[in-house]
Amino acid sequence: MTYILSVDVGTTNVKAVVFDLEGRQVFKSSLRCPVYTPVEGWAEQDPDEVLNRSLKVVRDCVKAIDGRVEALTFSAQLYSVMLVDRSGSPLTRILNWMDGRSVQEASEVSEEMDGYRLYRKTGCHISPMMPVAKLLWLKRHRPERLGKAFKVLAMKDYLLHRLLGLYVTDRIIASASSLFNIHENRWDPEIAEFLGLSLDVFPTVVEPDKVVGEVDGSLSEKTGLPKGIPVVCGGGDGMLQNIGFGILEPGLAASNIGTSGAVRVTSNRIILDKSRRARFFCHALIGDLWCIGGAINSAGLSLEWFVDRFLDGDFGRFEAEASKAEPGSRGLIFLPYLLGERAPLWCPEAKAVFYGLTLNHGIPELSRAVIEGVILALNHIKRVLEAHVPPVREVRTGGGGARIALLNQVQADVFQVPVYLTATEEGSALGAAILAAEALGYYKGLKDACKTMVKPVKVFRPNHENVQKYRRVFERYLRLSDALLRLFFRPRPP
């Protein structure tokens, strides 16, 4: 039996997942990975903690399958940045996507370089999440560290360096860095000059299915991996999830309910928002394929927050309570802006809201409103995307939140299309494994690999009566969100 091992470095967990060539998940090991917040709004991870936990989960998987691994590959969170010196030692922690310290710097980048022009060049909305803003913060507040920097890396780049001795990144993560010209397929010299950096500080960019090395004796000793097996670069988790869900043609969309949430489609050309609000991203996928979409900050995070604060951490009770409430939660609406909001609002100052509370509302309505609020926010992204891409006729879903059947039914009712649950919730890891299988010649191409390895196992179809209710709820949601943005949250640039 041929097995591929994918290491998936997420926001709060590091996982290693073993797949066979049929796409079946054979084994998984997972460890929590701390996120440090020494100052409110900061979000840092220790690069060597990430490395050591990655090695541990790989060891667990290798032991479970008696070392029968044919290839190692990776998926990892987007928008992270860190600095290393000439010896490869960290000069900073990893500033992950949740890090919001660079609000002022993001505004300065947008004002001085024209944020919409940068969006047209990089496919990235300039925000505190973006590495360009974080690097400007480091230039202002940690100039001695930036001055010593030999390389500017993302989280996965650091892992590959420590494991293989290379400074290499994939085109997905590069294109999501706000530092990369997606039209010219290179690090952008104008942006580098603005930051006072030479282009040499950025790693070499390769396709995510590129074999970048092989397991040497040292790595084999640390993990149990067979010496000499290929290491495939892999890529950014969100885009790889499109592959793991088989989202390769028009009319299909991925919906992810992880810590954050996202709606994404795949295109064979670059598509950018015609509005200067730059409401969605355009990141590379592989070859001539592009991933178009948007993400909200607090999807699974909203669910976890509510369950931890109000239901003593009991997710089983959460779904049971939410199921007691009628669609629309008796007029109660939740805006899931616990960490501000990304797409399509791009308002870091936004705050979460329960609107419409009365004496008649209880835990059932509150629970259902949280689920509905997350899906309504994702539907807002879907509506914006459909003004630029073919209408979505089918959604495929995954992530930890997709374990909740009611949430999937709400997706179908709000999106008004069938929603398919895939066989594994580890869509990003599967996407990396699919690329590895294709790269090593087990399949004739990406579509051939996806046809075999992607397995939708359950479908949730729209309930006509609920669809009508949610149309009205969604319009109320839009009016409420718009009013709060205008009246209470700091207005964003037009």
Image (cartoon, grey):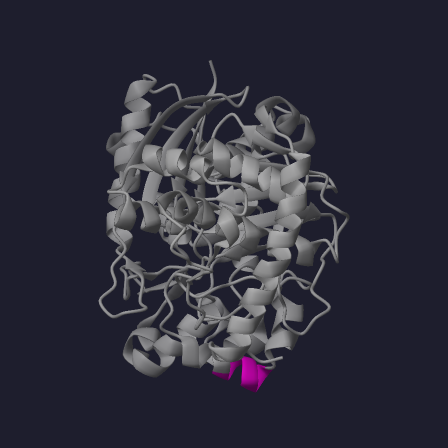
As drawn, is 438 to the left or to the right of 217?
Answer: right
Where's residue 110, x and y in %? Answer: 55, 80
For image coordinates 61% across by 26% down, the residue present is: 441
Is 250 drawn above or below residue 488 in the view shown? Answer: above
At 62% from the left and 65% from the top, the residue drawn is: 279
Q: Is residue 44 above or below residue 8?
A: below
**Whole-percent x and y of residue 37?**
25, 63
Relative placement, left or right, of 465 versus 435 is: right
Q: Is residue 208 visible?
A: no
Quadrant housing residue 443: top right
- Is 473 magenta? The answer is no
Image quadrant containing the C terminus: bottom right
Residue 210, position as x, y percentages in the image: 55, 41
Picture quadrant of residue 39: bottom left
Residue 272 visible: yes
Residue 396 vertical position relative to residue 387 in the rendered view, above or below? above
Residue at the top extreme?
1
Q: Which sits in the foreground, 365 or 423?
A: 365
Q: Main secondary structure of the magenta part?
A: helix
Place of residue 181 in the rendered image (x, y in percent of width and height, measured from the top left): 62, 66
Q: Nearer the viewer, residue 342 or 379?
A: 379
Q: What residue is shown at x 75% (from left), y 47% (from top)? A: 391
Q: Which segment did they paint magenta? A: 108-113
Q: Residue pushed farthest front?
A: 359
The outermost residue toward the bottom is 112
Q: How many marks?
A: 0
Image-based side of 197 in relation to 273, left or right: left
